[in-house]
Amino acid sequence: MPKASRIKKNAPPPAGYDKVSPTLTKLQAKLKQAQVAQSVRTGSSASTKQLSLWPIMQINHQISRYVYDMYYKRKLISRELYDWLLVQSYVNGDLIAKWKKQGYEHLCCVQCIMVQDKNHKNACVCRVPKATLLKNGDEESTKAVECVTCGCRGCASTD
Ligand SMILES: [Zn+2]
Ligand SMILES: [Zn+2]
């Protein structure tokens, strides 16, 4: 495990932060909006509450994906900056750790593969490749593919 914990939460951003800050600021603002919208909907039933979390989950995913691409794929930011973003909780370290594994490159959220999760008895249906769904069932079953946790509509690596 990298020692990300050596970086203090209140440490100033390392060099290169200006490369990612415009996009991150934009996404963070979107996230705030989604969180405000979600908090307005208090008192609704558990299932609508879960639904209203989808935008938040999806924006969080987008932020992690962006930083992941910048560091692992495009190699435009330093390890130091990546660790700093991790410590600041900009990104979901657990999710990124999964993306590095074969077969999980597009995983939408870690809940989807936590089979003990209250929502899932098995890995989430969105993890099943579209081709497999088509083979096993009718057209309808492929349309119903939606992750209860984040609303993902399919994140198998082959899709
Ligand atoms: Zn998914
Ligand atoms: Zn998901």
Image (cartoon, rainbow, N blue to C red):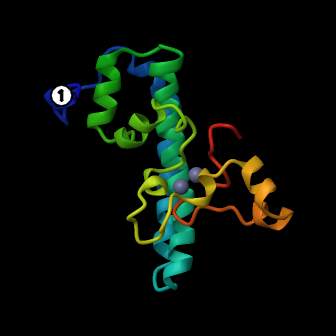
Using the image as rendered, state which of residue 31 and residue 61 is in the foreground.
61
Residue 51 image offset from top left, x and y in percent: 57, 70
Left or right: 125 in relation to 87:
right
Left or right: 28 in relation to 78:
right
- Kindly tell me whether residue 2 is visible in this rendering: yes
Secondary structure, mark 1, is: loop
Q: Please tell me how crowded label 1 is: few (under 14), some (14-19), or many (20+) other residues with Cα within 10 Å.
A: some
Q: Residue at x 34, y 31 (%)?
A: 85
Residue 123 image offset from top left, x and y in percent: 51, 58
Answer above or below: position of 32 versus 79.
Answer: below
Quadrant in the picture for the N terminus: top left
Q: Residue furthest front?
A: 136
Q: So how many labels did they put on this image?
A: 1
- Kindly tell me whether residue 25 is visible in this rendering: no
**Which quadrant would residue 106 be assigned to in this image?**
top right
**Mark 1 highlights which residue?**
7
Amino acid on which the number 1 mark rests in the picture:
Ile
Using the image as rendered, state which of residue 43 and residue 151 is in the foreground.
151
